[in-house]
Amino acid sequence: MIEQTYIYDFASELSTAANGSSLKLASDRRVAATPPFLEARARFPDVTAKSLRAVSEIVGARFYVPPSMLARILREADPVATVGANAVRFEGFSACCSAYIRLDLDNDALETQQRRNGTTNVDFGPELRGALSAVAGA
């Protein structure tokens, strides 16, 4: 068995300012990119936030937890984000691997300022999930 531990330099966050909200997702420090993989504006922030929250809930769900797996499951409860030419994809399996979820945000959903191909795990901690729940329509 190969064990993988993700190391985030900061917690993902959703901050609000006069000109709108800003979502900053932390990625594993071994693949963190400069410049970032993506800088974009969600055209439908409420729909995007609810969809990202659904991804987070499935990835963090434990429909069945073998007692010997609990610590590993809790460490791996973050989705994977992939930035490509035509979409940004968030995906993951539930902690027990019985459910899969995928969210594709295409070019109609984002006003992109910068895009670079890449894939990384992203931190979806409880603070971010709570903030995503509070996002209202544009």
Image (cartoon, rainbow, N blue to C red):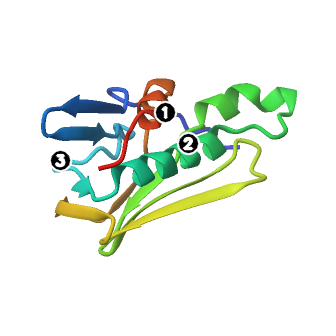
Q: Is 44 above or below relative to 29? A: below
> Three-letter amino acid code at disc 3?
Thr
Nearest the viewer among 104 and 6 is: 104
Residue at the far bottom: name it.
Answer: 86
61 sits left or right of 18 in the view: right
Mark 1 vs mark 2, CA separation in Å: 7 Å
User: Who comes first in sequence, dot 1 or dot 3?
Assistant: 3
Q: Which residue is mark 1?
A: 129
Q: Position of residue 107 (x, y in %)?
A: 30, 71
Q: Amino acid at mark 2?
A: Ser
As rendered, which of 32 and 41 lies closer to the eye? 41
Give the mark nearest the N terminus, 2 or 3.
Answer: 3
x%, y% of residue 72?
68, 31
Which disc number belongs to residue 34? 3
Q: Mark 2: which secondary structure?
A: helix
- Identify the element where label 3 is drawn: loop
Dot 1 amino acid type: Arg
Q: Eyeballing the image, is 60 above or below 99?
A: above
